[in-house]
Image: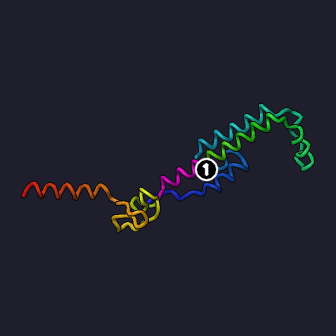
């Protein structure tokens, strides 16, 4: 049994949308989270002009500051956010495939859940333990050769 829980890819995407790297914190990918945080803060620091940064934080100040953001800075920050969302989604999907329920309970061919007591997938009729089938053929060949 796995020690990790299944992650929710869409939750990771929403968190990455709120702030790049936050989805990676949810996934416990600490180094990636730090990279995304650092990239976002550095890009903001380098691309934002001083007049676009409000001195106080109120709704009217934030609206006025948003109007002063140059288009290239907005595009760069939006691209960082989108790539962080994509990366968080891929990482969540990868973690889920790594933490699939016990081996043998999903069909290697179609990926659906199957009864671990069966030797074949009842969905696509694929043999679940091809290595055990090969072993039984070898033992049959050996017994035929000894006779």
Residue 83, position in %: x, y? Answer: 66, 42
Residue 137, position in %: x, y? Answer: 21, 57
Residue in front for this viewpoint, 137 or 91:
137
* Vertical position of residue 5 compared to residue 118: above or below: above
Residue 40, position in %: x, y? Answer: 72, 39
Residue in front for this viewpoint, 109 or 18:
109
Residue 85 is left or right of residue 71, and the answer is left
* Vertical position of residue 102 compared to residue 20: above or below: below
Please give the name of the residue rendered at 8% of the width and 55% of the height, measured from the top-left corner: 146
Name the residue furthest front: 124
The magenta region covers: 89-100
Quadrant of the rendered structure where residue 147 is? Answer: bottom left
Residue 5 is left or right of residue 121, and the answer is right
User: Count the marks: how many?
Assistant: 1
Q: Quadrant of the N terminus?
A: bottom left
Name the residue furthest left: 147
Please give the name of the residue rendered at 65% of the width and 56% of the height, measured from the top-left corner: 11
Please give the name of the residue rendered at 12% of the width and 58% of the height, measured from the top-left corner: 143
Quadrant of the rendered structure where residue 124 is? Answer: bottom left
Residue 42 is left or right of residue 86, and the answer is right
Secondary element at image label 1: helix
Residue 45 is left or right of residue 122, and the answer is right
Residue 16, position in %: x, y? Answer: 68, 49
**Colour mode of the rendering:** rainbow
Quadrant of the rendered structure where residue 8 is? Answer: bottom right
Q: Mark 1 sits on what residue?
A: 89
* Vertical position of residue 75 compared to residue 13: above or below: above
Please give the name of the residue rendered at 36% of the width and 64% of the height, measured from the top-left corner: 120
Is residue 96 highlighted in magenta? yes
Name the dominant secondary structure of the magenta segment. helix
Is residue 97 highlighted in magenta? yes
């Amino acid at each position: 049994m796995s020690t990790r829980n299944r992650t929710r890819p869409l939750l990771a995407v929403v968190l990455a949308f709120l702030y790049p790297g936050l989805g990676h914190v949810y996934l416990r990918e600490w180094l990636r989270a730090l990279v995304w945080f650092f990239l976002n803060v550095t890009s903001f620091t380098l691309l934002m002009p001083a007049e676009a940064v409000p001195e106080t934080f109120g709704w009217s100040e934030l609206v006025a500051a948003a109007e002063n953001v140059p288009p290239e800075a907005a595009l760069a920050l939006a691209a960082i956010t989108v790539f962080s969302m994509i990366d968080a989604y891929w990482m969540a999907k990868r973690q889920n495939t790594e933490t699939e329920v016990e081996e043998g309970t999903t069909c290697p061919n179609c990926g659906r859940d199957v009864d671990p007591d069966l030797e074949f997938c009842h969905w696509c009729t694929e043999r679940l333990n091809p290595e055990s089938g090969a072993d039984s053929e070898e033992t049959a060949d050996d017994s035929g050769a000894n006779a």
